[in-house]
Amino acid sequence: MKRTCLPLFFSALFICLSFFAKAQNVGAYPTTLDFRLGGGLSESQVINISNTSGKKVQFKLYLNDWVRDSMGGHIYYRADTLSRSCAKWVALSDNFVELESGQVKQVTVKLSMPADAEATKEMKWAMLFIETVKEANATNDKTTQASVNNLLRIGVHIYQTPPALTNKEVKVYDLKPSPEGLNIYNLICQNTGDVMLECKSYLELAAISDGSKTKLDPIEFPMFPGQKRYVSFELPKNMAKGKYSVLGVVDGGEDMSLEAIESQLEVK
């Protein structure tokens, strides 16, 4: 399978495009559609696409598959490429939308689950992109073809979690220095359950010399089932040199016990 782009590039691009969309006064809401369907069932949810700019805007809508890499970056694939994709079950009421200034249009997203048991064995997901397009003016040159210039796009997360899937579990495996720089450490964890988790992680350090404690600010991140994640922590610049006992903690959310690992490190 061929990746469509590098994860860091797409993460930066996605942030820039979201900012650009706000600046251009076009948008979509909600940006997450959460389905919880059993086999053979279907449900429709609505996305509101708005244009509060001073000119007409055109949008094209399409689906992609995607995953998060170990650092949280997004990697995109052609729709219905990945085993965890729900793209083939999704139908859109519109694939193209044109809005005059001040208009809002609702687009219906319908997810229809097959009746077979295989479809409900695991969580599935996809990404719906709403992308503005502008058709170039045609010229008298017969060899010139109309082109489409991409201006911005907004991603809508689509999640399908069968209601029978309830197991929540996260494991913490290691805390090790990061190759990104001095006094940066990666806490390595994995979602070993069946559903997506909204996690929070932090480090608590105790100086071996005097027992003084330092707790780093928590980092929040989602994890898909089966996903391994490297959570990167940078120690404070003014932290005293010496050896520390470290407790690395991952909180997987409600109804879950904290998972932790103990280690030692030296601040140089």
Image (cartoon, rainbow, N blue to C red):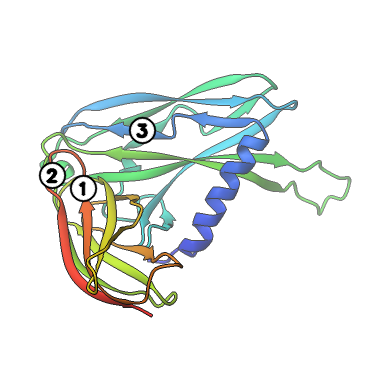
Q: CA distance from mark 2 to mark 3?
A: 24 Å
Q: CA distance from mark 1 to mark 3?
A: 21 Å
The image quarter containing residue 73 is bottom left
Report the residue marked by disc 2: 256
Of circles 1 and 3, which is in front? Answer: 1
Rendered position, 60 above or below 190: above
Q: Amino acid at mark 1?
A: Gly
Tell me if 230 is positioned left or right of 51 in this view. Answer: left
Q: CA distance from mark 2 to mark 1?
A: 6 Å
Q: Identify the residue at horizontal 74%, vertical 27% (top origin).
A: 55
Residue 82 is situated, as x and y percent measured from the top left of the image, at 31, 56
Residue 29 is situated, as x and y percent measured from the top left of the image, at 48, 28
Report the residue marked by disc 3: 33
Residue 24 is situated, as x and y percent measured from the top left of the image, at 68, 35
Q: Amino acid at mark 3?
A: Leu
Judge whether residue 192 can be spotted in this image. no
Observer-nearest residue: 215 or 251?
215
Report the residue marked by disc 1: 252
Tell me whether the residue at label 2 lies in contact with that at label 1, contact meaning CB atoms closer than 8 angstroms. Answer: yes
The image quarter containing residue 232 is bottom left
Tell me if 132 is positioned left or right of 129 in this view. Answer: right
Q: Amino acid at mark 2?
A: Met
Tell me whether the residue at label 1 lies in contact with that at label 3, contact meaning CB atoms closer than 8 angstroms. Answer: no
